[in-house]
């Protein structure tokens, strides 16, 4: 178990505001959660875990059938390898899209350098990485085409929010204004015929507030992607009810030969509120409640032949663990008094054993 501060990557302070709290992330062996931090850097009280949205969905939704069939066709070992490769590429693509959004320009001629730096920084290499630079160029061209087509005005990037009412949290890839064609009665009327003088349905370019989640896969979107986008819309609207989201969209690059193209899908209104609530409640039962109650083991200090190694073991709940980085809650009683090592203590590393769920 590790814990870290997770800030919003970028936002336009002239257009939107940050929430009145900060966010930390607790990484367990299986899944992750978020915690609320007050502006002074201490844990918000009462302490609670906000399950990561992706973890919530994984705990509550079956793996998409198409994905299961793909894994079966390849075999577990090869499927795991390809998924790991694609996960790394997706992370790299997200980073590069973020750079473009913040800077407004992108140098395709540096893609080889980008790949080299990423694989070096993440100590990762696979033979498929030899194709990454070309694929990254294709995907960045696809994204910039989308960006221009929809006249994107970025408002926030990796914008981290928590839901008090539903108990989950997540970073939102992109909050923006986008311009779309919308059909409606825009003042035009029929000039002749039986409907002369009646309002006429026409299309007009209108600006909408949107959240967009980037996907690197080129084979389309799954139902779980829609659940994620519906939840992100609820999350934003809960935190900023005065500025509700109009469009919740996935974007992904498409396979193209000569003209950069992409895939998009709007998800708002595609899933019932009852289904979303059921998914999130089930995640709280299966994950959040267990994680908050469990005792975790940390190891620190100096060990030797002179004393029992038990002195280097400390047992604590997740709140005590997080307090060692984000402050104190002096009124809280420990669920279990930790054994203190007799030897001099080494600096705290804020790591613990993995969550066995």
Image (cartoon, rainbow, N blue to C red):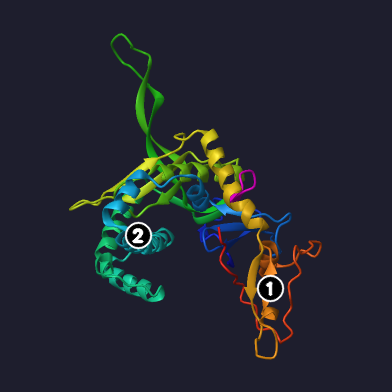
* Marker count (numbered): 2
Q: Nearer the viewer, residue 210 or 284?
A: 284
The residue pinned by badge 2 equals 83
Q: Residue furthest left?
A: 258
The answer to which image quadrant residue 192 occupies is top left
Q: Quadrant of the N terminus?
A: bottom right
Q: In screen coordinates, is 2 left or right of 78?
A: right
The answer to which image quadrant residue 339 occupies is bottom right
Which of marks 1 and 2 precedes in the sequence? 2
Q: Residues within 10 Å of mark 2 (few under 14, many from 20)?
A: few
In the image, residue 65 lies at what x, y percent?
Answer: 35, 44
What is the secondary structure assignment of the residue under circle 2?
helix
What is the secondary structure assignment of the residue under circle 1?
strand
Residue at 39 percent of width and 75 percent of height: 123
Q: Residues within 10 Å of mark 1 (few under 14, many from 20)?
A: some
The residue pinned by badge 1 equals 314
Segment tinted magenta in the rendering? 161-168
| Residue 123 painted magenta | no
The residues tagged by marks 2 and 1 sit, at their Cα atoms, a distance apart of 36 Å
In the image, residue 213 lies at what x, y percent?
Answer: 43, 50
Give the vertical position of 14 relative to 178 (above or below). Answer: below
Q: In screen coordinates, is 124 left or right of 229?
A: left
Q: Residue furthest right?
A: 331
Give the vertical position of 314 relative to 29 (above or below). Answer: below
């Amino acid at each position: 178990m590790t814990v870290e501060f997770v800030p919003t990557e970028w936002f336009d302070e002239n257009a939107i505001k940050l929430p009145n709290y900060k966010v930390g992330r607790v990484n367990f062996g299986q899944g992750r959660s978020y915690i609320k931090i007050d502006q002074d850097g201490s844990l918000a009280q009462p302490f609670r875990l906000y399950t990561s949205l992706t973890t919530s969905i994984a705990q509550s939704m079956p793996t998409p059938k198409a994905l299961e069939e793909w894994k079966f066709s390849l075999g577990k070992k090869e499927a795991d390898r390809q998924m790991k490769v694609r996960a790394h590429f997706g992370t790299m693509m997200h980073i590069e899209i973020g750079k473009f959004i913040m800077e407004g320009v992108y140098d395709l001629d540096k893609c080889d350098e980008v790949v080299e730096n990423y694989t070096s920084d993440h100590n990762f290499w696979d033979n498929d990485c030899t194709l990454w630079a070309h694929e990254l160029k294709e995907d960045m061209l696809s994204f910039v085409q989308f960006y221009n087509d929809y006249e994107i005005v970025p408002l926030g990037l990796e914008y981290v929010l928590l839901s008090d009412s539903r108990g989950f949290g997540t970073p939102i890839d992109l909050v923006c204004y986008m311009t779309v064609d919308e059909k409606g009665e825009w003042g035009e009327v029929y000039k002749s015929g039986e409907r002369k003088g009646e309002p006429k349905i026409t299309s007009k370019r209108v600006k909408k507030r949107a959240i967009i989640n980037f996907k690197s896969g080129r084979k389309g979107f799954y139902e779980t992607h829609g659940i994620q986008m519906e939840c992100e819309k609820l999350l934003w609207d809960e935190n900023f009810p005065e500025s509700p989201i109009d469009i919740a969209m996935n974007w992904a690059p498409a396979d193209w030969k000569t003209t950069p193209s992409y895939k998009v899908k709007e998800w708002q209104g595609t899933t019932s509120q009852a289904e979303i609530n059921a998914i999130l409640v089930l995640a709280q039962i299966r994950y959040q409640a267990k994680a908050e109650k469990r005792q975790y083991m940390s190891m620190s200090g100096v060990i030797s032949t002179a004393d029992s190694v038990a002195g280097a073991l400390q047992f604590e709940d997740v709140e005590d663990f997080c307090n060692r980085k984000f402050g104190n809650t002096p009124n809280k009683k420990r669920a279990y008094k930790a054994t203190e090592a007799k030897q001099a203590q080494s600096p705290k590393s804020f790591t613990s054993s993995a969550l066995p769920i």
